[in-house]
Image (tube, rainbow, N blue to C red):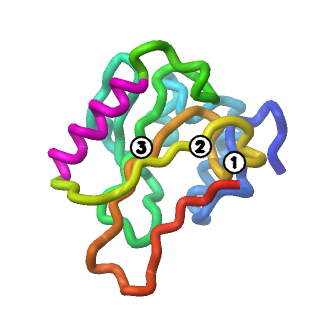
Amino acid sequence: MYMTKDYVNLDNARHDDQRNVMSTIVEDGVCPFDEEFLANYHKQPILRQGTFWTLTLNQWPYEYTRVHLLAIARQHVETIDELEAGAAEELFDHVKWAIQEYQIDFGGLAMRFGDVRHNGASVNHLHAHIIVPDKDKPADAKVKFKIS
């Protein structure tokens, strides 16, 4: 279903409403994480913004999470090697802020990069996930971050 001109991969959508929004994005032919289009599709509040990253709540958080944030690159980049100097440090500053703000005592930071036909991402624009599992989830339940 993914085509080179598309900025999203519908095959990686996890929810029907997410797939509907992504179908609109395909029709519009824009990157939903580019700053000029973000508010058209992403309805969660912007928590923080730096020179390189925008920090926001994930619109479709993973099952069994207490906190699921996205750090979205402010410039349209698709791979880590396209980031400017200082971007990694700022990303970690956002993570440290989130740890304090959400009283996070455990969690994960995950990022996919490159071709969304192969990496498991739904949007072909570099972004990182700050994922905090819910302590009260069922004992056998796991938060799953898809890659590939």
- Residue 114 location, quadrant: top right
Whether tag 1 and tag 2 are in contact, CB under 8 A, the answer is yes
Q: Which residue is mark 1?
A: 119
Question: x and y percent of residue 1 in the render?
Answer: 83, 51
Q: Is residue 117 above or below residue 104?
A: above
Tell me the CA gap for discs 1 and 3.
17 Å
Q: Element type at marker 2?
A: strand
Q: Quadrant of the C terminus?
A: bottom right
- Nearest to N terminus: mark 1 or mark 3: 3
Q: Which residue is mark 2?
A: 112
Q: Amino acid at mark 1?
A: Asn
Image depth: mark 2 or mark 3 in front: 2
Outermost residue to the bottom:
139
Q: Residues within 10 Å of mark 2 (few under 14, many from 20)?
A: many
Q: Residue at x 24, y 44 (%)?
A: 98
Q: Which residue is mark 3?
A: 70
- Nearest to N terminus: mark 1 or mark 2: 2
> Is 91 contained in the magenta span?
yes
